[in-house]
């Protein structure tokens, strides 16, 4: 019975490890996706800042003339 119990504990530990690895891998995928979206949003912010600076420059030029 003692040996049977050890086998059960080892199997439980293996199952738990597999579950943890699956959760880890899923979180890594989520992080990669979120980081890609973050980079995309950062690029959009930079582009929009340029657009806004262009509008400000145009506005200043239009007021002078």
Image (cartoon, helix red, strand yellow):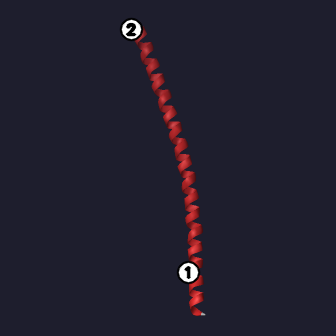
Comparing 2 with 50, the one in front is 50
Residue pictured at 40% horizontal, 12% vertical:
5
Residue located beneath label 1 in the image = 56
Residue 40 position by quadrant? bottom right
* Residue furthest out toward the top: 1
On the picture, is 18 further left or further right than 65? left
The location of residue 1, given as percent across then percent down, is 39, 6
The location of residue 19, given as percent across then percent down, is 48, 29
Q: Give the number of callouts.
A: 2
Which of discs 2 and 1 lies nearer the camera? The answer is 1
Residue located beneath label 2 in the image = 2
Q: Which mark is residue 34?
A: none
The location of residue 9, given as percent across then percent down, is 42, 17
> Within 10 angstroms of label 1, few (less than 14), some, or many (20 or more) residues?
few
Comparing 60 with 25, the one in front is 60
Whether label 2 touches label 1, CB < 8 Å = no
On the picture, is 37 further left or further right than 1? right
* Disc on the earlier residue, 2 or 1: 2
Q: Is the residue 24 above or below the residue 15 in the image?
A: below
């Amino acid at each position: 019975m003692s040996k049977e119990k050890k086998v059960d504990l080892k199997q439980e530990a293996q199952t738990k490890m597999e579950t943890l690895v699956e959760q880890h891998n899923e979180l890594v995928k989520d992080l990669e996706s979120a980081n890609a979206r973050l980079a995309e949003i950062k690029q959009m912010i930079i582009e929009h800042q340029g657009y806004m600076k262009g509008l400000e420059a145009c506005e200043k030029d239009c007021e002078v003339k």
